[in-house]
Amino acid sequence: MTGRNCWKICLSFLPPSAPSSYLAAIAGAFLLTLAGAGTGFAQEPIKLGVLNDLTGPFADLGGHGSVVAAQMAVDDVGGKVLGRPVTIAAADSQNKPDVAVTIARQWFDADKFAAILDPVPSSVALAVVGLARERNRMVIIASSGAADLTGKACSPVSFQWAYDTSVLAKGTAQTVIKEGHKRWYLLTSDSVYGHSLANETKAVVQANGGTVLGEAVHPYLTSEFSSFILQAQSSGADVIALANSGTDMTNSVKQAIEFGVGEDNTKLVALTAFITDIESLGLDRAKGLLLTESFYWDLNDDTRAWSKRFGERMGGRMPSMAQAAMYSGVYHYLKAMAAAGTTDAKVVAEKMRETPINDFMMKNGRARPDGRIVHDFYLFQVKEPQESKGPWDLYKLVRTIPASEITPPEKSTGCPN
């Protein structure tokens, strides 16, 4: 029974001669009932769910740190939006699209979650974005980088905040080629992300006058790279490029060094590397690697201040670009929700696109209709051990790459939005 119907029924029981005080009392009770109902609704939480790798090969770069970063964003908006508390839940995707979609469907359909955050890896992100598009729910991607997420698989209610394979390939490969290393051989993970990164890199190499001599595709999440490294060494390439990520990247770097890659004229290039990967490898192994990222904790006063707050919650660990992007994306989303006056994903997404992004991670960033966040990137080189002044002092800045230089033109990605 609606409040309006109750009001009509209550009045029908009153005699025509009922004093006005009766009517006033009933009207007051009715208004209190509506206020109570409104208050109850207002207190219903806005639920956000982090659906990433909490225990496996991508846990360091996102994982629990992404949950912490999302909660920091919630805390910094006051814990409430539209008068409703904002809550964060977390679940492990197990890096399996079917597992992730089952969780996402439960969150969307039964538990009424407003958004899913940080789906990883790219195969999971693609599956979750497809479901979210059907349900009109928000997705903010931080750890996954397949270019199709802002290309043919784009969605009007999803955003890829930190990076993608196209900018990593352009930022790193173009620089290496300009240094004179033009004969490339790729070690590629047999995964959505690996093939996306390899294809983007091949295009950059060829566009800049280089040659791809060959490619070895290795099993996804493997520990044995020796045969693939030997193939690369025998090709005569002067660049061996790793089109993989997570533990595949760190394991292949370790084994490439054991086989002497980098000691001769061959250059080892890790096309995807997070600060957590470099910390895991150690400077003795990672020294000299070039890498493209959208964030580094020690860039300026703003990045240091936020990273200190993050580190206090993470036992001194510094944030990866994915974890920084998680905060930036969630904070922008919640502020846009407040400005839009609704949780409706399409309406909030439009407000997110209207509003410039200015925080510790980026200045004058903007969200495009294809879901790409347009902002500057940075080319870093991993320090020599003697250059480091202490824990997490791992990078030196080679150059800032302006957004205008590294961002694919709008309407060029294949996104139908």
Image (cartoon, rainbow, N blue to C red):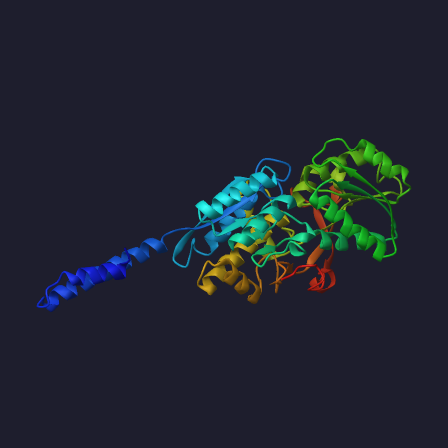
Q: Where is 357 relative to 96, above or below?
A: below
Q: Quadrant of residue 281?
A: top right
Q: Quadrant of the C terminus?
A: bottom right
Q: Is residue 190 left or right of residue 228?
A: left
Q: Is residue 31 left or right of residue 308?
A: left
Is residue 63 in view from this perspective? yes
Q: Residue 37, percent across and down?
A: 30, 56
For the point 55% across and 47% down, the residue is 310
Q: Is residue 164 left or right of residue 240?
A: left
For the point 20% across and 63% down, the residue is 28
Q: Residue 154, percent across and down?
A: 63, 56
Q: Quadrant of the N terminus?
A: bottom left
Q: Nearer the viewer, residue 177 or 352?
A: 352
Q: Residue 49, percent across and down?
A: 50, 46
Q: Where is 235 relative to 35, above or below?
A: above
Q: Residue 291, percent across and down?
A: 74, 49
Q: Nearer the viewer, residue 104 or 275?
A: 104
Is residue 93 in view from this perspective? no
Question: What is the total number of numbered labels drawn onto the structure image?
Answer: 0
Q: Nearer the viewer, residue 386 or 27?
A: 27
For the point 17% across and 63% down, the residue is 11
Q: Quadrant of residue 413?
A: bottom right
For the point 74% across and 45% down, the residue is 195
Q: Quadrant of residue 214?
A: top right
